Image (tube, rainbow, N blue to C red):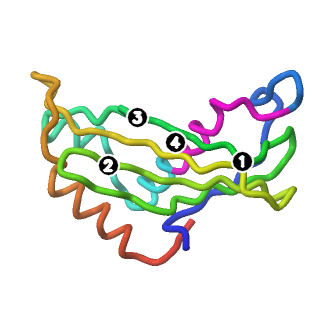
Amino acid sequence: MAIFSINGRVRWFETDTGGVAHFTQFMVYCENLEKELLYSDSINLWEIEDKYNIWIPRVHVECEYKYPLYFHDEYRVDLINIDIGRTSIKFIYEIHNLTRKKHSATCKITLVTVDRGSNRPVEVPNELRSRLEKIIGGSSRG
């Protein structure tokens, strides 16, 4: 069961010359879900970064592609898990081609909380950890 989901449609500028969504767009679709998830729970990462003097960069992305998304195809992005470590947060997504009823990809994006001065990993602030844990424990939304 998804923690959170968003739907979309592949737009022309997202495709290659064959009319297939460019592989980089899958990361954009995942980040769009992340943005909507944070907005839905009024989590402002900029404020958290400023308050704790940290950055939260993406340090690892991966995507296992299963089936293409074509121009005009409708898709759904599901957030299926959030793994919160001591200094990292990993979002795990599934992307589904709704038009063709196929699983298109499984993607993972890992963020690390780092001190702004030293650029060294620091613990995920309890404020952010507890907000994300609440989301994980809540019902499916989106």
Q: Residue 11 location, x and y as percent?
A: 79, 36
Q: Which residues fall within the magenta stretch?
A: 20-33
N-terminal-most mark, 1 or 2: 1
Kind of residue sitting beneath label 2:
Ile
Task: Check disc 3 and report its element: helix, strand or loop.
Answer: strand
Q: Nearer the viewer, mark 4 or mark 1?
A: 1
| Closer mark to the observer between disc 1 and disc 2 | 1
> Magenta segment: does it hold 32?
yes
Task: Say the numbered circle drawn on residue 138.
Answer: none
Tell me the residue that label 4 is attached to: 31
Q: Position of residue 110 (x, y in %)?
A: 38, 42
Helix, strand or loop at disc 2?
strand
Image quarter in which the N terminus is found = bottom right
Q: Is residue 63 left or right of residue 98?
A: left
User: Mark on residue 60?
Assistant: 3
Contact flag, marks 2 and 4 (Cβ < 8 Å): no
In this view, 128 is above or below 71: below
Of mark 2 and mark 4, the one earlier in the sequence is: 4
* Left or right: where 130 falls relative to 142: left
Closer to the chain start, of discs 3 and 2, is: 3
Instruction: Judge by depth and name the residue closer to the eye, 52 or 16.
Output: 16
Q: How many residues crowd mark 2 within 10 Å: few (<14), some (14–19), many (20+)?
A: many
Q: Kindly identify the amino acid type of the residue bearing the numbered disc 1.
A: Lys
Which residue appears farthest toward the bottom when viewing the image? 139
Q: Which residue is mark 2?
A: 89
Q: Could you tell me how far apart the alpha carbons at marks 1 and 2 are, in whole angstroms?
A: 24 Å
Where residue 66 is drawn, which disc sits there?
1
Dot 1 falls on a residue whose secondary structure is loop
Query: Residue at horizontal 44%, vertical 61%?
Result: 81
